[in-house]
Image: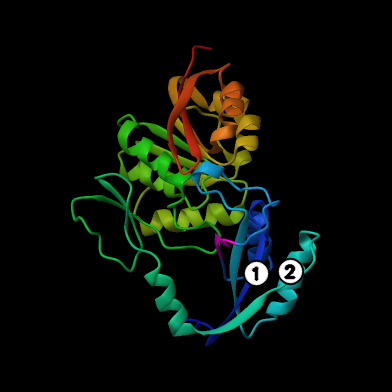
Amino acid sequence: MPEQPPARYIAVTFDVAAQSADAWGDALLGCGALSVDAADAGAGTAAEVPLYGDSEQGGWRVARLTVLFDEAGAWQAAFARAAAALDEPLPAHSTAVIQSADWVRETQAQFAPVPVTARLWIVPSWCAPPDPSAIVVTLDPGLAFGTGTHPTTLLCLRWLADHMPARASVLDYGCGSGILAIAAAKLGAAAVTGVDIDPQAVATSRANARANAVTAAFCAPDELAVETFDVAVANILASPLELLAPLLAGRIREGGQVVLSGILEAQAAGVLAAYERWFNIGPWGSSEGWVALAGVRSAR
């Protein structure tokens, strides 16, 4: 018989400085949380807390995290372990009991089909595609890798939909849920490979590729075969992107293209400087304070 979901859940809500929200989310999921939702804590937050994101683009000072635990599990201990892993005190928090059926309905109601371009959509598995002629990437909210609708992801998806060469070979570096690799395959890439340092991301990407009936290979970076690609996309963060510049340059053929995202507008100049040795590169698009860069591999 299939495993039954918990009858009830505990939702734990607390506020943290926005720039530490990702670290808290990773720690909580690693300690047994079922999901972590982040939202802007809104007005009344401390003015001295720095903004997470561009102040003119609606950056947050404080994030409100809502964490879901199985009520039957030792959620208090898991919460405490996450705080200890971050070397942080246990934050002040509130709790609420949520019935299983209510949580499923409420969660699904939050997610609807998202148009990336006129021909490309992200659609949860419980929704009917709004346009039967569209290319659809089926993606459900996961435990660790979101819904694929963050501005940095959408920028990469739009580039792939509008600029990916026909029958290209594509490398998705830092694949997460696998959404960029899956979209590339559905958009006509001849071969697609995704890599991630997180084994859970590799497993999630493989499962999502199967759900979308596409062929794509996923592995850890040190398992990647010695080869070059027509296109590499990397939606990570500015600092690791700068460090990865020589590696990605070595993975893209002469005349091939690179797309970089996960970069705040104020960080773009630093990332550009790291890649200009190998690429004719510049800003391609921006959204909500984030910028994507795109460039062509110069002759070696």
Residue of label 1: 14
Q: Is residue 179 left or right of residue 56?
A: left
> Residue 65 appears at what percent x and percent y?
60, 65
Relative to 181, say whether 111 is above or below. below
Report the front residue among 27 and 175.
27
Q: Do the residues labelled 1 and 2 touch (CB within 8 Å)?
A: yes
Q: What's under tag 1, amino acid-wise?
A: Phe
Residue 42 included in the magenta stretch of the image? yes
At label 1, counting other C-alpha atoms closer than 10 Å, the crowd grade (few under 14, some 14-19, many 20 or more) is: some
Q: Residue at x 42, y 62 (%)?
A: 140
> Residue 148 appears at what percent x and percent y?
44, 53
Does the image show residue 216? Answer: no
Residue 91 badge: 2
Residue 26 included in the magenta stretch of the image? no
At label 2, counting other C-alpha atoms closer than 10 Å, the crowd grade (few under 14, some 14-19, many 20 or more) is: few
Q: Residue at x 45, y 46 (%)?
A: 151
**Span shown in magenta:** 37-43
3D distance between C-alphas at marks 1 and 2: 7 Å
